[in-house]
Image (cartoon, grey):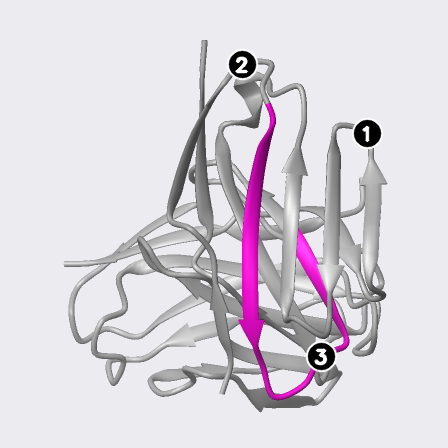
C-alpha cells in the first residue's frame, strides 16, 4: 500500500528535551512538508522540501529543524528552543512543487511536552 | 501576508444542504483546495479549483471567484459521517496556506 506513515501517533517528552518526529512516504513524491495544528487554528507550515538535500523554512520554523537525506524520509526535530511545542504535527507529500499541488497527509503525531 | 477566512462552526440536519464560505487575500494564487478532516485524523482531499466556476464531485461541489477572492464548498444530502472540519487552502508559490477550518455538525 502506498502512503505516508508517521510515528509514533502519541509522544510525550519532558520540557527541555529535543524530540524527532518520523515521516516516511512510499509514493515516490518529490516534495514533503511539515505542518503544526493547534486547536482553533489552521495548519501552519513549519518546513518544506521540494527535492532531496534541499529544504526551506515555512511560516513558523523557529525552534524546529529538518533534514532530507532521502527522498522517502523527512524527519522533524522539535528542539528545546521551541517555546510551545505541544501540538498535533502533520507531515504531507506531493508529486512535485507546482500548480495543482495536491498534498497527501500522514496520520499525524500528537506531541505533548510535560 | 496570507489571510484566509472561514466560519468557525456550522450545524445542519441530516439530508440538508450546507454551504461553507471561504474568502481570501493572498500575495499570490495558483488554485484553491478544500480538505475534510475528521477529529484527530489526517486531512483528505475533496476538491480543487483553479478557474472561476463550479466543480461538482458527487455530493460535494466547490465554487471559485478569483476576482472576488471567494470560494464555497457545498455539501448536499448531508450524512452523519459528514460531521468533520472542512479546510480551505490557497496554493501560492508551491505552498498551501490554510484557513482555520469550519467544523460542521450534522444532526439527526
Q: Is residue B20 magenta?
A: yes
Circle 1 residue: B58
> How would you rate the neighbour count of disc 2 (Cα within 10 Å): few for under 14, some for 14-19, many for 20 or more?
some
Q: Which mark is residue B14?
A: 2
* Alpha carbon distance from label 3 to label 1: 26 Å
In the displayed structure, A24 sits above or below A57; it is: above
Q: Which secondary structure lies at badge 2? A: loop
Chain letter behind tag 1: B
Decide whether the magenta segment is chiefly helix, strand or loop.
Answer: strand
- Earlier in the chain: of badge 1 and badge 2, it is 2
- Image spot of residue A46 (x, y percent): 48, 77
- Residue A71, given in percent of the width and then of the height, sits at 76, 73
Q: Position of residue A111 (x, y in %)?
A: 32, 56
Quarter assignment of residue B78: top right
Circles 1, 2 touching at the beta carbon (< 8 Å):
no
Instruction: Say whether residue B35 is visible.
Output: yes
Disc 2 from disc 3: Cα separation:
35 Å
Asked whether the viewer can see residue A103, the reply is no
**Tag shown at residue B29:** 3
- State which region is magenta: B17-34
Amino acid at each position: 500500500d502506498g502512503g505516508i506513515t508517521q510515528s509514533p501517533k502519541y509522544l510525550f517528552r519532558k520540557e527541555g528535551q529535543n524530540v524527532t518526529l518520523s515521516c516516511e512516504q512510499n509514493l515516490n513524491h518529490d516534495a514533503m512538508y511539515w505542518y503544526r495544528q493547534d486547536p482553533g487554528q489552521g495548519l501552519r507550515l513549519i518546513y518544506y522540501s521540494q527535492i532531496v538535500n534541499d529544504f526551506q523554512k515555512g511560516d513558523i520554523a523557529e525552534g524546529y529543524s529538518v533534514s532530507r537525506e532521502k527522498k522517502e524520509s523527512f524527519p522533524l526535530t522539535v528542539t528545546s528552543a521551541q517555546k510551545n511545542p505541544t501540538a498535533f504535527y502533520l507531515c504531507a507529500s506531493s508529486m512535485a512543487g507546482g500548480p495543482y499541488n495536491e498534498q497527501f497527509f500522514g496520520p499525524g503525531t500528537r506531541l505533548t511536552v510535560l | 501576508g496570507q489571510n484566509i477566512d472561514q466560519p468557525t462552526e456550522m450545524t445542519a440536519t441530516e439530508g440538508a444542504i450546507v454551504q461553507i464560505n471561504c474568502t481570501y487575500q493572498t500575495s499570490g494564487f495558483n488554485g484553491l483546495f478544500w480538505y475534510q478532516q475528521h477529529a484527530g485524523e489526517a486531512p483528505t482531499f475533496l476538491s480543487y479549483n483553479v478557474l472561476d466556476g463550479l466543480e461538482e464531485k458527487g455530493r460535494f461541489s466547490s465554487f471559485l471567484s478569483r476576482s472576488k477572492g471567494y470560494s464555497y464548498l457545498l455539501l448536499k444530502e448531508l450524512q452523519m459521517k459528514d460531521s468533520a472540519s472542512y479546510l480551505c487552502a490557497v496554493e501560492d508559490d508551491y505552498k498551501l496556506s490554510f484557513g482555520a477550518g469550519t467544523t460542521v455538525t450534522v444532526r439527526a
